[in-house]
Image: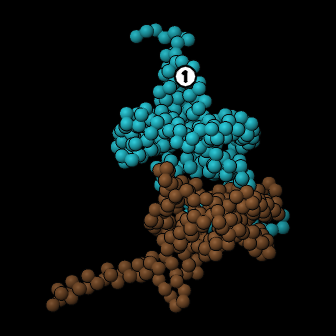
Amino acid sequence: MRPLRPESPRYRRVRALSALLLLLPLLALVGGCASTAYHDRGDPLEPFNRKMFVFNDHLDRWILQPVARTYVRFTPKLVRASVTNFFDNVEYPNTILNQFLEGRFREGFQDTGRFVVNIVVGVGGLFDPATRFGLPRHDKDLGQTLAVWGVGQGPYLVLPFIGPDTLRNLPNLVASALTNPFFYVNTAKITMPLGAVALINKRANAAAQIEMVRQALDPYVFMREAYLQHRRFLIYNGHPPVQLFNDFGPGGLAPAPAPAKRAKPKPAGSGAH
Amino acid sequence: MLQRTLLILILIAPGFLATPVLAADAVTATGNHVVAGPVGVITRFQDTLIAVMKKAKTLGYRGRYAQLAPVVTATHDLPIIAQIALGQYWGRLTATQRSEFVKTFTRLSIATYAARFDAYGGETFTKPTERKLGGGDVLVESQLRSPDGSKVQFDYQLRRIDGHWRIINIIANGVSDLALKRAEYTSVIRSHGFKALVAKLKDKIAEYSRKGANAAAAS
């Protein structure tokens, strides 16, 4: 074993890993007091989040969106599909790791098979033959694993440059980096342009969804609800319990109305919740 | 003899028990009306969407709106959706405000479909299946599949009101349309009031209609 030099890439990795390990107990602590249903606590960081939402929105309008549009204009559809396949596969070890962490061994082995098949048969991941062989793509990350382990969601966050997130999901920023093979390529000349292409391609693929957010009555609220619901969908492997809407009582994030001076509060409908 | 009678009873009884359930699920004709079960409602709705998408360009926005309007209003319970979407604020509206809101909301719902389903790229819906939810509601599940292999899970929540099964919510890949609307609408009412919400919805309708007219002029 070589001693760790502070500036060595290996030191960087070990530091990142230990940061992750330090974060885990912290999250468990948060989980103890944070409610899984964020509706109970609302969106405590909304003022900060809204500022970050506007910041990201400007950043996107001024830089990412025009670049992504140019990319779409000059790149054939098939090439873009291969770029998407390639980066999906590069990021796939994170899904594999978290299948195992969730105890889904069958899916873990299937996803390992998918990763290998797409590298070997799919020319380094440019194509996705695995889906046709009955190994469909899954979407797993450390945030979902922590949810399955019983960690509470914590507050909703909008992070600059990153976008919607939750406290529980933060360790995944580290985990997704550590499980990405390119993290271990220490040549900025390779990783920087690849990272840029990955980002632009992701933005291009999300164009329709981003447009939907922008068309919403309140884009911030729309994004928050859609994000949190989709996370729930992933945590439950595509089969979350259905919200019934059986009562017409208070719902969403609307707080109870301030009691009007003259009106007497009506008794709440039976079986609210 | 007794044994035979018992056997027949056992064979027939489950059939008896099952009959009303089957009748409720299948498409049954009562008099002149055809009452569709949950799967029938969804099939009708999805078939209409695909048909409209296939003819999207020739129909134009107005044509799509006209074709979708009767089917959307028949397959969706728009007054109930409107009511749930306003959450606690519904109870504080006057009768006039309520009917104005339902009217605007109905037009917006049709306009949104007409605006979004404006092209066909070979998409198909898988055969819908249904399962029961609590409180008498039914969930019908189907997938929208694109030729590129991508798929979106569509779950429709249906409720039986006045003998008709109608959609009260659509959940796409876990994102519930009704929950989104309720969060958005109540947020707008809370910060800007009910009038502002209705004005915003009307702006949306006008925007869809304007963009639709522009698209027709461009092609």
Say which residue appears at 76% left-offset and 56% top-offset: B188
Quarter where residue B76 is shown: bottom right
- Few, some or many residues within 10 Å of mark 1 (<14, 14–19, 20+): few
Colour of chain A as rendered: cyan
Q: Nearer the viewer, residue A237 or A40?
A: A237
> Is residue A263 left or right of B115 when viewed as pictured?
right
Indicate whether B112 appears above or below A231: below
Q: Position of residue B206 (x, y in %)?
A: 78, 62
For the point 62% across and 38% down, the residue is A74
Q: Residue at x 51, y 78 (%)?
A: B36
Q: Viewer-proximal residue, B51 or B42?
A: B51
Amino acid type for the residue under numbered disc 1: Ile
Picture quarter with the N terminus of chain B? bottom left
Q: Colour of chain B?
A: brown
* Res. B140 visible in picture: yes
B8 vs A259: above or below: below
Can you give x and y, in whole percent of width and height, for residue A96 in the image?
42, 37
Spot the residue most to the right: A261
Q: Provide the secondary structure element on which disc 1 rests.
A: helix
Residue identifier under label 1: A190
The chain letter for the residue carrying disc 1 is: A
